[in-house]
Image (cartoon, rainbow, N blue to C red):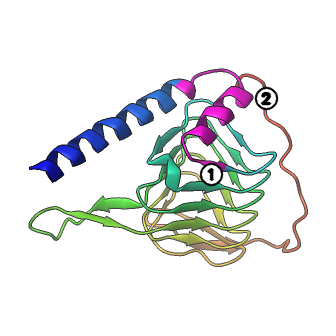
Amino acid sequence: MIHKIHRRITTVISEYIVFWLHLIGLFPSHTVRRFFYRLAGITIGSGSTIHMGARFYQPANIAIGKDTIIGEGVVLDGRANLIIGDHVAMATEVMIYNAEHDIHSQSFGALSGDVRIEDYVFIGPRAIILPGVTLKKGAVVAAGAVVTKDVEDYTIVGGIPAIKIGERKERDFSYKLGRSAWFR
């Protein structure tokens, strides 16, 4: 009984934090948002920007590298580890999940797997990354793709489920993503 009460209190506190982070995500100041995101446990590298409207689940398991841009309305799931590298460009409304239901289980239990996004990856608008996936260095995910498996270095994927549609020609990246607009 005590375990059940403790679990319920922990869940309520966690949901309260997620609610406040959602509200903070609507505040039009990168500095203020970044301060509260870090306070909630998200690791954010120097020069990285998280645009307005981002949603987080269990933020303490989320780490974002340096010079990375997270677009508007992105969902970042920290129910397992979510590691985002340096110089990653993530477009609007990308969803990254690292937990899902086991549809083959009688109890419909949870399955989870760490998601890792390496350096210089680009993820297009409204792409979905599912649990256990690694996007390796320089990978590109096309808009609207659903990534269910690892993506190799410099590989371009698209579709549902995502499949290889090409490769990046450049492999010696040195770009910086620049700074964000004030009210994004």
Horizontal and vertical percent for residue 88? 72, 56
Residue 51 can be seen in this image: no
Residue at the image position 23 percent from the left and 48 percent from the top: 7
Q: What is the secondary structure assignment of the residue under circle 1?
A: loop
- What's the mark number on residue 181? 2
Q: What is the secondary structure assignment of the residue under circle 2?
A: loop
- What's the mark number on residue 132? none
Magenta segment, which residues? 24-43
Residue at the image position 50 percent from the left and 70 percent from the top: 133
Horizontal and vertical percent for residue 29? 71, 24
Residue on which the image places disc 1 = 124
Residue 44 can be seen in this image: yes
Q: Nearer the viewer, residue 79 or 117?
A: 79
Amino acid beneath label 1 = Gly
Q: In this view, does 131 lie above or below 36?
A: below
Residue at the image position 25 percent from the left and 39 percent from the top: 9
Mark 1 and mark 2 residues within 8 Å of each other at the beta carbon: no
